[in-house]
Amino acid sequence: MNRSPTREVAAQLDASDPLADFRDRFYIPEGQIYLDGNSLGLLCRDAEATLLAVLQKWKTGGIGGWLEGDSPWFTMAESLSARVAKLVGAEADEVAIANSMTINLHQLLSTLYKPETKRRKVLIDAHSFPTDRYALRSHLRLRGLDPDENIVIAPAGDSRFLDEAEIEKALKDPTLQMALFPSVVYTTGQLLDLERLCRAARANGVIIGIDMSHSVGLIPHALDEWGADFAGWGHYKWLNAGPGAVAGLYLNRRHFGANGFVDAGLAGWWSVHKESMFEMSDEFFPGLGASALQIGTPAVLSMAPIDGALIPIEAAGLERMRAKSLAMTEFLMAAIESELEEFGFQIGTPRDPKRRGGHLSVVHENAQAMCLALRARGVIPDFRKPDVIRLAPSPLYNSFTDCWEAVQALKEITISRGFEEFEAAHALVT
């Protein structure tokens, strides 16, 4: 920042914020400064409206909702896919709205992972999200492979951060068949150079996938341009589509079969070609493009909020959202350094904006008790073991003043030792 962070500077930044009006489109819990949007985004009025519209259609039309009206449920997933594809840098037929993130990962592994005698290992990172590891290990076991022998972990080294140069070296392993990395590392907020990693994977004949759960709806992506093979994400974090919202996946067109058909690894009712679905044939006719990976009947009530949640994001534009997000995390870092550094707080997120996602990791030995104390004061952060406070300001509903007030609350509980009363709860949790 060019100016020292103060309450007055925060107010000035808010006054000139081009996205300030979007705040009124969200339900912000009374008395709270909500900084946990990378875990669950807040409800926007647009998402509420599209969910209520589906409920009304069900209420008044029953089964007719599947095929009647301007937004029939039968093609809702495809309509949403076309819009989400623009956020991830893909063509509409390369994106599917389906299942949950973990189920989609199982589906993508079943479709793309083809272990050979010499190439059957999978490369992941040292900080990979647990569900990715769980899914991968169980999938390998189902294939009759030992996960301990066939999962290679790219280490973080002495730093908390991943080194793309080291990952590039690991991708040269001739026994690798696949690699899976996050767009943003959930513990540190590090944004990986995905174009670089995809290029290295392609050069070495390795299929590469990206878990974009911590970046979709906030950071522009270019999956086709990067040359990624597959990707998966949820819509309930930065995209604000609600708890349990239907997830999304990407499958690059080079994995489509003749005429665009895709033979899904896990097949089901909704994997069938749409025009053949109601023929009830014993013969399986694979669907077109990524939509073939949907498996089962879409959860319409969990998909409907995505329709509305996309509206403010499309109106704000990812470029403007990304710019404000970076400005807020930069403001937070400056405020933490000026207000909290003397109390042992450290920034656990890269300083370079090109390497920074949307949330800030703040490191302190009393992090968990401090998170509990902050919540008691109405500031909602997130905690990750062993010592990380995650602060995730949303460019759509948070302000720079929110960021300043959160730092001041953290300073007050530190000086007053107000977090100590929560240390017993900390001990129970750990």
Image (cartoon, rainbow, N blue to C red):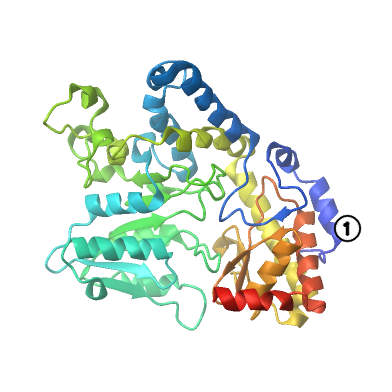
Left or right of residue 318, residue 165 in this image: left
* Residue drawn 51% across the image and 56% down it: 214
The quarter of the displayed image where residue 94 is located: top left
Residue 202 screen position, x and y as percent? 29, 58
Left or right of residue 79, residue 401 in this image: right
**Quadrant placement of the C terminus:** bottom right
> Is any atom of residue 227 visible in this view?
no
Tag 1 secondary structure: helix
* Residue drawn 81% across the image and 64% down it: 5
Residue 107 screen position, x and y as percent? 28, 49
Residue 416 screen position, x and y as percent? 82, 77
> Is any atom of residue 266 visible in this view?
yes
**Quadrant placement of the N terminus:** bottom right
The residue labelled by disc 1 is: 8
Q: Is residue 164 above or below residue 40?
A: below
158 and 54: which is toward the camera = 54
Left or right of residue 14, residue 385 in this image: left
The quarter of the displayed image where residue 66 is located: top left
The quarter of the displayed image where residue 421 is located: bottom right
Residue type at mark 1: give it.
Glu
Q: Is residue 162 above or below residue 359?
A: below
Badge 1 crowding class, 10 Å Cα cut-off, few under 14, some 14 to 19, many 20 or more, is few
Residue 187 screen position, x and y as percent? 53, 68
164 and 143: which is toward the camera = 143
